Image (cartoon, rainbow, N blue to C red):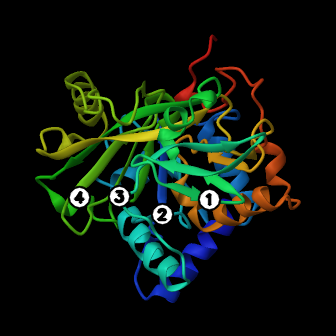
Amino acid sequence: MAEQSREIWRQWNVKFGVELYHEIGFLFMRQRPIQPGDFEYESFTLLEQRGHRVERIDSTQLRERYPAWNSERYPDGFLDLEAGYAESGRAVATLIQWAKSLGVELRENAKFHDLDEAGDRIKGIVLEDGEKIAATAVVMAVGAWTPYALPFTRNYLRASGQPVFHLKPKQPELFTPERFPIFGADISTTGYYGFPLNRDGVVKIANHGPGREMSPNSSDRVVTKEEENQMRHFLSDSFPALTDSPIVFTRICFYCDTHDGNFWIAPDPERPGLTIAAGDCGHGFKFAPVLGGIIADAVEGKSNPLLGKFRWRPKVKPGETKEAARFRGKL
């Protein structure tokens, strides 16, 4: 999926005449030599086997090429030269305009209230103002709102919030894409990742961990002082030049989690006419170019090998994710 998505992101840059996707590389470093079984080792090995351009990076190379890093803390890792990031806001705005040009009707500011059920099937949705929109097929792709908009999914879908920080570095020259590519800093242990200086001169640092379970409408949808202190401690260990950088703003990034870390894209067996597309687990946006086709196959009942993995699977239990940074089960 990632390889297919990357190719389409490249095509979209040309198609839309705007650079939505920036292929600047992704640097994964670890706080000890990487070895078989480590996320970094297994990722490097797989990428190399699949013909991607990857480089091993040691502490000497880290110090010389990426001086913002604390090279004494991170002795080993690798650089994925063919990785990049997409500007989510610009990409969504661009895709909205494309959808409109294709005749898609967007109902902006219309708030979902409930499914419209008739007999043994779903025949549409009901808006907050009481208006009903009829449909032969309803797809609910509402991200972290899923377990709240559709309460019957709460046993297998969870909304979680992750802290995101935007900082203004005092030494911006250290954080340009050439000297500070996208990073994962021992991410399976710390959860921290981030992005280089953007067009506004801001560096983004975020955590990809268990997160805090909460509703997207919760008053808890703010970064806590404890989360800020943890981030500052991480910076002092990893990127000393960022330690005292002022925070421009913070936010909570919402995930819709499944128990096993895989997407949930499937027709509801108890509600004919309804397909649920959820379970991004923090990895959804990068797959934007290919998810639509997978969801369409689920709605139309077409064969797609990925739909077996993303099937309706209510018996999966909490803690079955294999992603170390996000593990919540008992060890």
Q: Secondary structure at mark 4?
A: helix
Q: Is residue 71 visible?
A: no
Tell me which amino acid carries mark 2: Gly
Disc nearest the viewer among 2 and 3: 3
Tell me which amino acid carries mark 4: Leu
Tell me which amino acid carries mark 1: Ala
Q: Earlier in the sequence, mark 1 or mark 3?
A: 3
Query: From the viewer's perspective, is residue 15 above or below residue 241?
Result: below
Q: Which one is nearer the viewer's eye here, 244 or 119? A: 119
Identify the residue at horizontal 14%, vertical 56% (top origin): 171
Tag 2 near tag 3, CB within 8 Å: no
Residue under label 3, please give it: 109
Residue 103 lies in what quarter of the image? bottom right
Residue 73 lies in what quarter of the image? top left
Categorize mark 2 by other alpha carbons within 10 Å: few (<14), some (14-19), many (20+): many
Q: Is residue 257 left or right of residue 225?
A: right
Categorize mark 1 by other alpha carbons within 10 Å: few (<14), some (14-19), many (20+): few
Q: Earlier in the sequence, mark 2 or mark 3?
A: 2
Q: Secondary structure at mark 3?
A: loop
Q: Earlier in the sequence, mark 4 or mark 2?
A: 2
Q: Which mark is residue 134?
A: 1
Residue under label 4, please give it: 174
Categorize mark 4 by other alpha carbons within 10 Å: few (<14), some (14-19), many (20+): some
Residue 1 lies in what quarter of the image? bottom right
Q: Which mark is residue 25?
A: 2
Rounded to the nearest angstrom, the CA distance separating label 2 from label 1 is 46 Å
Identify the residue at horizontal 41%, vertical 79% (top origin): 19
Tag 1 near tag 3, CB within 8 Å: no
Q: Which one is nearer the viewer's eye here, 184 or 198? A: 198
Measuring from the top left, give residue 277's x and y in whole percent: 64, 49
Q: Is residue 302 left or right of residue 140?
A: right
